[in-house]
Image (cartoon, rainbow, N blue to C red):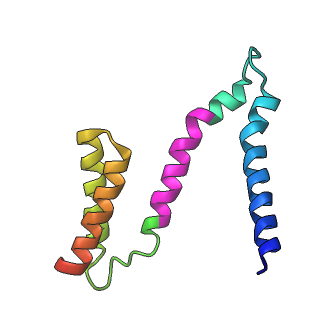
Amino acid sequence: MTNAQMILTVVIIMAATMLTRFLSFLVFPAGKETPAFVRYLGKVLPAAAMSMLVIYCYKGVDLTAGNHGAPELLAGLGVILLHKWKHNMLLSIGGGTALYLVLIHLVF
């Protein structure tokens, strides 16, 4: 890839990112009421996205072979407990990842 192609790629990515960030301000200007369906989506989409991520993480777990999914389930439980304890998403995700790595490398 030449320098010109790399610069063009960065410019296109930057323009697309800026467009997606500024589009909401163009579609819903300040002082105008946000439509009900957008407020509804703002309430339900975060939970739906997290649910899809959890399903994606557990889709490859084989409960009938090897360690029967114990490291994955214990790490998931660790994430839940950390989040209930500290209410910090970064700590929960990082702690769960660290716990999973310890479990697969040192325990199972």
Residue 50 locus on image (x, y percent): 49, 50
User: Residue 57 placed where, x, y %?
Assistant: 44, 66
Q: Residue at x 74, y 24 (%)?
A: 35
Viewer-nearest residue: 67 or 25: 25
The answer to if 35 sits in the magenta stretch is no
Image-based side of 65 in relation to 20, left or right: left
The main secondary structure of the magenta stretch is: helix
Q: How many marks?
A: 0
Q: Is residue 25 left or right of residue 96?
A: right
Q: Position of residue 2 (x, y in %)?
A: 79, 79
Q: Is residue 108 visible?
A: no
Magenta residues, as a range?
A: 42-56
Residue 100 sits in quarter: bottom left
Considering the image in quadrants, where does the C terminus appear?
bottom left
4 or 12, which is in the foreground?
Answer: 4
- The reply to whether residue 33 is visible in this rendering is yes
**Residue drawn where x is 30% and y is 59% of the image:** 96
> Looking at the image, which residue sits at the far left?
107
Which residue sits at x=47%, y=70%? 59
Which quarter shows the N terminus?
bottom right
Residue 99: quadrant of the picture: bottom left
Q: Residue at x 23, y 41 (%)?
A: 85
Residue 20, image x and y in percent?
A: 75, 45
Q: Is residue 83 depicted above or below 26 in this figure? A: below
